[in-house]
Image: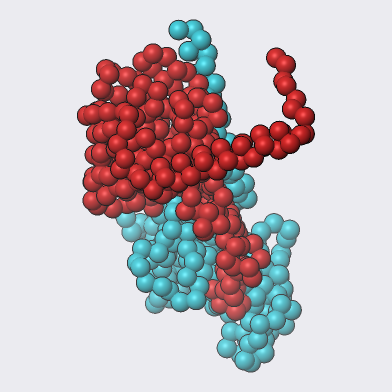
Amino acid sequence: MAIERRPWTAAGKTAAGQRAARKAARWLALLAALATPSRSARAYHTEQEHLTDDTAWTIAGDKAWRLGLFKAAVGLGDRVTLGSYIWPWVGRTPNAYLKWRFYAGDAWHWAAQVGFFRLDTAAWDKKAPDPPVFTVTSASFLQSVRLSKRNQLSNSLVFTAVRARGTVDQDTLRGAGDAGLTNLQYVGAYELRLSKSTALVVTGRYLIAQVLEASTRFTAHPDEYTTIDVVADAQDDSVVNFRGAFSIVPSFAWSWQTFNLELGLGYGNFNVPGVNFMINRRTLIPTLDMYWTF
Amino acid sequence: MAPLRLRTCWPVAGLAGLMLGCSTRGVVKPRAPDMTELVASYDSPTGVLDGRDTAQLAAAVAIFSQALASTDLVPRLRDLLGALIEPVTPNLSDDEDGDNGFHLDVKANGYLEATRICPGWTLPSVVDAGNGNVHATATFSEKGPDPVVWGSVAACRYRVGSTLVELTPAADVDGLRVYWGEDVDRETLASKDLVFSIDVRAEIDGESSALDVDFRVVDQGALEYLVPVDSGVLVVRANADGSFVLRSRDGSFACAEDFDCDLEPLDGN
């Protein structure tokens, strides 16, 4: 395909100015869209556009970006989404996730997702010689099926590994540790499309297994004459003994032209998003998310 | 559907690989000496009561008793065992326990190595590495501490009252071995039967002698000595009144201070 090269003439300058004007207009339109979230327009729970949280779906159709309260993401084609949780960056925690919808059929869709967080406590404690570093790696295997035009069901297995490594340095104790917490969760999401812009989503989460693994080396001084060096590793679920934790969260998802709002109230063990650590206490779980896709 | 199977396989394989890659490395524990046979000897002594062994028994028990009393070894070793077990005893209460409040509160696998500097001969004692030390090793698993603790002494100097004591190794092998058994913890240690096997040289007020003794601490303080005789080994329990109970493979016998034993077995065997 031949590309016409325009000469750098007055006409070219005009064309450049027009492009700039069009760009500015697009930004203005975007800002207007962001500022008027309740503007009703064409249906956005479509065959091309789907909720992407806890489903095999990726950002697709004519949308390439998602920006919201908690996440920012970009669609790389229709099959890949690259995103990040926003708030951890405030705590100097770089993080990202990548979802690949590797199979897209008429009814069945399959995807794999990996995520990564890294928290280096040196950002806060610059005096510590070897401050703890936490890394969170997650891998998900997701499947969504279109049961009917209005009914969608998604199932996923989420494996998460949290690893902490660091050194404690006190007068009576010097120790280095390496600890890992792994868990496996099942997440099911049922979506019932009530209208073109409204859907009821019921998300269930079940903690299948959670295991703490740790290796440590520390030196204790129980008295001034005695030094005890301890070398240990552990694999234990007694301190994280809440296998079987669950949550059920019904919510409504409204999707307009660019603005999306999710509101819900559920019950169970709250799951820290991204990190996938379930809190060992059952409570009411209110949910709120809003984001723009464009 | 074949392409689907192919495409779904490798993300699953990747997930499995990630799970395997996150497993932690294991600790390589030092190997404890085998005390099984020694421990079994206390319940199944192999020797027989023979009047010709009386002098040998009396002399051995007298030497052992005197040496242990002079060196104050048993309470000192028990104290070290208490310090050893502390870090691997889960802290079940929420209370902080002083400035050494560090415990493995999970089921763990590993080992501890304790070094206690000896207090020396000066009064008051000072922390000085030149006074030698006692070194002890214990291993533990997810079930709790393993049954054997072992260690050595290195020119360990201390006072027992006005008596000056120095313990030195008698051989290259570990001179201190203790069998504290299964399920020991901070609370049960004081009431546990402990089997000691000591092989050191003890210099007491300038007089050096071998201290090679196997004994068991039972009933929270009574001592049972394992004494070799021509026919095997006998177990001699020292009573508080100075008398003894002697156990042989033929039964238990009551003995006076001079090992004049009643030939009628205590248990009727």
In the picture shown, does residue B96 fall above or below A202? below
For the question of whether residue A130 can be seen, the reply is: yes
Above or below for B31 versus A6: below
Residue projecting furthest to the front: A10
Q: Nearer the viewer, residue A57 or B267?
A: A57
- Asked whether residue B239 appears in the rendered view, the answer is no
Q: Residue at x 46, y 42 (%)?
A: A30
Q: Quadrant of residue B176?
A: bottom right
On screen, residue B77 versus residue B164, left or right, reads left
Q: Is residue A208 above or below residue B82?
A: above
Q: Position of residue B86 (x, y in %)?
A: 48, 66
Give whichever of A203, B259 is nearer the camera. A203
| Percent of width and height locating residue B58 | 53, 69
Q: Residue at x 54, y 70 (%)?
A: B80
Q: Can you name the residue that lies furthest to the top here?
A: B2
Residue that lies at the very extreme toward the bottom in this rendered image: B123
Quadrant including the N terminus of chain A: top right
Q: Nearer the viewer, residue A16 or A107?
A: A16
Residue A43 % position (x, y): 31, 28
Q: Which of the chains is cyan? A: B
Point out residue A68 in the picture as x, y percentages from the top left corner.
42, 46
Q: Quadrant of residue B155?
A: bottom right
In the foreground, B253 or A205: A205
Name the residue rendered at 59%, 47% in the picture: B27
Q: Which chain is red?
A: A
